[in-house]
Amino acid sequence: MTTTRPDTKTALARLLTEIEHRNPAQPEFHQAAREVLETLAPVLAARPEYAEPGLVERLVEPERQVVFRVPWQDDRGRVHVNRGFRVEFNSALGPYKGGLRFHPSVNLGVIKFLGFEQIFKNALTGLGIGGGKGGSDFDPRGRSDAEVMRFCQSFMTELYRHIGEHTDVPAGDIGVGGREIGYLFGQYRRITNRWEAGVLTGKGAGWGGSLIRPEATGYGNVLFAAAMLRERGEDLEGQTTVVSGSGNVAIYTIEKLTALGANPVTCSDSSGYVVDEKGIDVDLLKQVKEVERGRVDTYAERRGASARFVPGGRVWEVPADVALPSATQNELDAQDAAALVRNGVKAVSEGANMPATPDAVHLLQQAGVAFGPGKAANAGGVAVSALEMAQNHARTSWPAARVEDELAAIMTSIHTTCHETATRYGNPGDYVTGANIAGFERVADAMLAQGVI
Ligand code: NDP
């Protein structure tokens, strides 16, 4: 067990206060920074080189933040003005890498929290990618394809000057899927007159995309949850699982759970959730959400007697062995965690970024529930994005089985790294500490080697 010098803890507490002062009105960023910094004391105490003044201070300050105007016209000719963001947080390990989020809740603080998390997540993959994130407060819901296209074109007309295959490589996130990546890539190609496949990931399989990229985040999270269960002598087969969300991550989480013999009984969106005793029919869910761009109540209507829609409810009230939050940040609070524990949950693994509040994480860990933090558990998406970059660089395309094997190997390695690191620092089974410290060590080593920049 490593003991922590009180001065290390005091210095970190002081830095957290300073972060709050220097970044006012950014609660999500404060939350993400606090969650990481609070676990770093043991490693800073054990490895004095990391406690060097300025290292952690540099880590919490983005290398570059771009905020820009995105004007666009709707189908009736009305002009709208949205705000665009790209936060290039840390490039010590490789080009900035992280998705774009289009959602009305997006602001600089949300993008900074996501970009900060991304640094550690990307480091955990073991691949050469730095951390960044971007997006806009644009709401694609209810917009026509033509409106989404005009928005994406306007967004890229500014973003193109900040990105590039060796500089910064965006991908999808909430509200940005294959359709949006297509429009963004088309505009980038038009403006730059370059076929630069490696500038964006999540592309269509016929024009530079990697097979298994759409599936990767959800599949990866299920593999991570399975690894946590295996560590406790259990497996996923036969386990009742609750999944929140009904977007990219949720759909492929449900698909993989079903393939491994688990029973995923829920999905949700911001209007409520569906519980389906027979298990969610993933083909019907894909048809409703991906093809028709509909809502989950439509799934319940079409599915028949086994499914019902609960307006405004939260999936965490449904009894389950395993919970996989896959919608958005802070969607699982202490009350939800208490309900899960009461119902005997064994593992919670984050498909979304920071879906569990700090109180919820604490409560789950205290109750002995295996808890997989997003920066480890949902790293499969960005890992396969990095494999997409590798394929683009080599102008080749790998078969699905090869990508899936690599994804499985990466998720196993992330699980092992987190587990071993947590044990090394005296907290066996604490994947939060393990993920934060392991990600930190890799980035910090690179930053130290590259000097004060
Ligand atoms: P999608 O846009 O495909 O789906 C998002 C889902 O979450 C929708 O069902 C949506 O419902 C729901 N949701 C979003 N915001 C809210 C909200 N404020 N309240 C309730 N429900 C909400 O996004 P993804 O599936 O790609 O992303 C889901 C999560 O996974 C995010 O946290 C993202 O950062 C994370 N993630 C995604 C990766 C990827 O590869 N796509 C990689 C790693 C992490 P509604 O339509 O009603 O808004």
Image: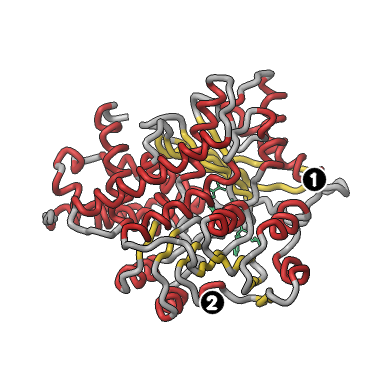
Residue kind at label 2, given as amino acid type = Val
Query: Badge 1 local density, few (<14 within 10 Å), some, or many (20+)?
Result: some
Viewer-proximal residue among 445 and 290: 290
Say which label, 1 or 2, has the lower sequence index: 1
Q: Is residue 202 visible?
A: yes
Indicate the amino acid at tag 1. Asp
Q: Nearer the viewer, mark 1 or mark 2?
A: 2
Spot occupied by residue 68 in the image (x, y as percentages of width and height): 61, 40
**Residue 66 position within the rendered picture, expressed as x and y whole percent measured from the top left:** 53, 38
Asked which quadrant contains residue 170, the reply is top right
Helix, strand or loop under label 2:
loop
The circle drawn on residue 318 is: 2
- Please give the residue where the numbered disc 1 appears in the rendered image: 145
Question: Which quadrant of the figure contains the C terminus?
Answer: top left
In front: 260, or 285?
260
The answer to whether the residue labelled 1 contacts the one labelled 2, judged by CB atoms less than 8 Å apart, is no
Residue shown at the point (54%, 36%) measured from the top left: 401
What residue is rendered at 41% in x and 50% in y? 375
